[in-house]
Amino acid sequence: METQKIRIGTRGSKLALWQANYTQQLLKDIGVEAELVIIKTQGDKIQHLGFDKLEGKGFFTKEIEDALLRGDIDMAVHSMKDMPTASAEGLVLTAVSYRANPADCLLIRKDKVDRSQTLKMVENPIVGTSSARRKAQMRHIRPDVQLEDIRGNVPTRINKLRNGDFDAILLAAAGLERLDLDVSDLECIQLNPREFVPAPAQGVLAWQCCANDKSTRRILKKIHQSNVSACTNVERKVLQLLEGGCHMPLGVYCMQDDQFNYHVWASKADTWDSPTKFVRLSSATKLGLAEAILKQLEEKS
């Protein structure tokens, strides 16, 4: 049994704390004691701008990575979709979690529901999202949509919807489910990830530590889900090939069937307000799969 006490770096939002507490429990289950260290990131501090207006990549991760490099914490837990495709020098993504529901959800105020319309929203609906990917795909489905940036943690966004700031908002289903939020007063539409394509690695947690910290790396390998990383590696490779960050209007979703064949759905727009291209590809191997997806996307240009 390991006797090392691991310091887990995390953001302080309710969802981030759920992720950190979940990680802490997983470690406890294998006999490893852990404590949480809360760190504020650029993404937490700047609440008035949309993601596409924030400079650089990794605005939910940089301060946590800096704490790792300083030795203030031993590991970090991130939403993998927020992670740059390349870790800072000296850091590695050592393990990933199970995958929660990868879909996006559309939450609509009951008085703004029109069941005769696509996605059940009234004409010219005001939809809140700060994700360029979600904006681009929503415009593709409902060209009449009025898109507005929305920031804050998941409960804050839902309260803004309830208060009438928006007719509807887009959120990750994983966050709603992990926080076990009651949204029965709202119309909730789960969007098929094969049609409304999620961000690369959406629904997956990533565990990061220092490359030279062999003790922590060995511990994290015990909770690693290799079947999940097989798919997220494909998704994130597409993102890497495009040299994009989590603000790029790119969706990639990969899954394996019972025969271990890979099926990939991808969407890409040049900007949030430009046309979105969709591709689908199946393969018996992940070798060259990301490159093939990228080629198909480029051919649709």
Image: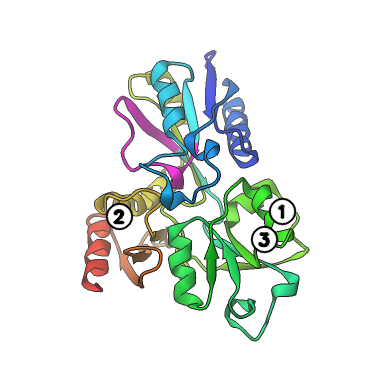
Amino acid type at mark 2: Val
Mark 3 or 1, nearer chain start: 1
In the image, residue 41 lies at what x, y percent?
A: 50, 33
Q: Label 1, on which residue?
A: 159
Residue lying furthest top: 3
Q: Give the range drawn in magenta.
A: 78-95
Q: Which mark is residue 11?
A: none
Identity of the residue drawn at 54% across and 13% down: 3
* Quarter location, residue 15: top right
Classed neighbour count for the residue bearing mark 1: other residues with Cα under 10 Å, few (<14), some (14–19), many (≥20)? few
Is 258 situated left or right of 152 in this image? left
The one of 267 and 217 positioned closer to us in this rendering = 267
Q: In this view, does 275 lie above or below 2?
A: below
Q: Is mark 2 on a helix, strand or loop?
A: helix
Q: What element carries label 1?
A: helix
Classed neighbour count for the residue bearing mark 3: other residues with Cα under 10 Å, few (<14), some (14–19), many (≥20)? some
The one of 177 and 283 positioned closer to us in this rendering = 177
The one of 233 and 64 positioned closer to us in this rendering = 64
Q: Label 2, on which residue?
A: 238
Is 249 situated left or right of 219 in this image? left
Q: Is mark 3 on a helix, strand or loop?
A: loop
Marks 3/2 in contact by CB < 8 Å: the verdict is: no
Q: Label 3, on which residue?
A: 165
| Residue 188 appears in the picture as rendered | yes
Quadrant that contains the C terminus? bottom left
